[in-house]
Amino acid sequence: LSPTDNSAYYNYNDYCVIVIDVLRASTTINVLLELHEKIHITEVENIDNEMYKDKFIKFGEKNGKKIESCDYGNSPLEVRLNKDNILNQLNNNDNTNNKEILLATTNGTRVLKSIISDNIFIGSITNAKYVADYVFNVANEQNKNIIIIPSHRKGMFAIEDYIGAGLIAKYILKNANKYDITIDIENLIPAINLVKSDWKTKIINSASAKNLKNLGYEGDIIFCSSENTQKIVGMYKDGKIVNIKKI
Ligand code: MLT
C-alpha cells in the first residue's frame, strides 16, 4: 500500500485487514505489546507535538534512523534490551507520572492510519501463525473477507512484506483446509509459492535489510525474520494499537 501522501485513506470496512511491515514496524509493535497493553501511534512529523510532551516514552524512526528527540528508535532488539527501563517508565512505583508508549515510523504506522476498517490487525513474520489463526476466526464469525496489506516502502515494493503476507496466507489456508472451508486465494498464490523457497535469504538481500545493515541494525533483520516467535496479536483502532491476544 504505502501511500506517499498522509491524507490518503483506504476504505476496507467490509474486510478484516492484516497490515504488515516486517522490517520493522509490525515486529516492534509486537515486542512493545509484550510490555504494555496499548501503543499510541502518530505521524513522524507530529512526534514532537506539545500534546505528547512528558506523557509518553517516544519510539520513532525516519528512514530507519532513530529520530533524535525520541527515547528509542524503531528497533525490536533495542526494545528487548531496554525492557527493564521501559517497564520502569511505564509503571512508576508510586503510580505518579506513569507514561504511555508513542510510536511513529516512516511507513508502517502511516499505512495503519490510512486504513478505514473496524478490524485492523498487525501482522509480522514473528506472529504469522497467531495473527492468521485469530483473524481467520474473526472473519468467519463476521462473515467477512480477509485482506493482507504489505506496507512496502513509500510506493516501492518491499519483498519482506510480500513474504510476510505469504506466510500469513499459508496459515490462513491451513485453517480453511482444517475446517473444510473453500477460500479464494488466487491473488496470494505467488506469495505462498515464494515462502516455499529460501525466503530468509531474500529478506537478508532486500533493500530494506541493506539499509538497516548500513545503520548497524543487522540483529533486527534476523529478529524480524524469525517465524512464530511472538504469540501476540495487536489490533489498531482510533490511533491506538491494543493487545487483544496474549496467547
Ligand atoms: C517503517 O515503518 O518504515 C519501517 O518500520 C522502517 C524501519 O525499519 O524502521
Image (cartoon, helix red, strand yellow):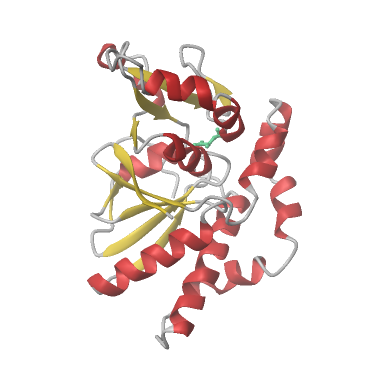
Q: Is residue 142 above or below residue 198?
A: below
**Number of numbered discs visible in the structure rendering:** 0
Q: Is residue 193 above or below residue 239?
A: below
Going by the image, does 136 lie left or right of 26?
left
Going by the image, does 85 lie left or right of 7?
right
- Residue 46 placement (x, y as % from top left): 34, 21
- Residue 170 placement (x, y as % from top left): 55, 71
Front-most of residues 102 and 98: 98
Residue found 57% across the figure and 63% down from its top: 167
- Residue 107 placement (x, y as % from top left): 47, 38
Residue found 36% across the figure and 22% down from its top: 91
- Residue 83 placement (x, y as % from top left): 53, 27
Going by the image, does 77 lie left or right of 111?
right
Q: Quadrant of residue 118?
A: bottom left
Q: Quadrant of residue 216?
A: top right
Residue found 55% across the figure and 21% down from its top: 66
Residue found 42% across the figure and 20% down from its top: 58
In the rendered image, is residue 121 in sight?
A: yes
Q: Residue furthest front?
A: 94
Q: Quadrant of residue 114?
A: top left
In the rendered image, is residue 59 in sight?
A: no
Q: Is residue 132 above or below residue 71?
A: below
Front-most of residues 141 and 207: 141
Going by the image, does 129 lie left or right of 211?
left
The C terminus lies in quadrant: bottom left
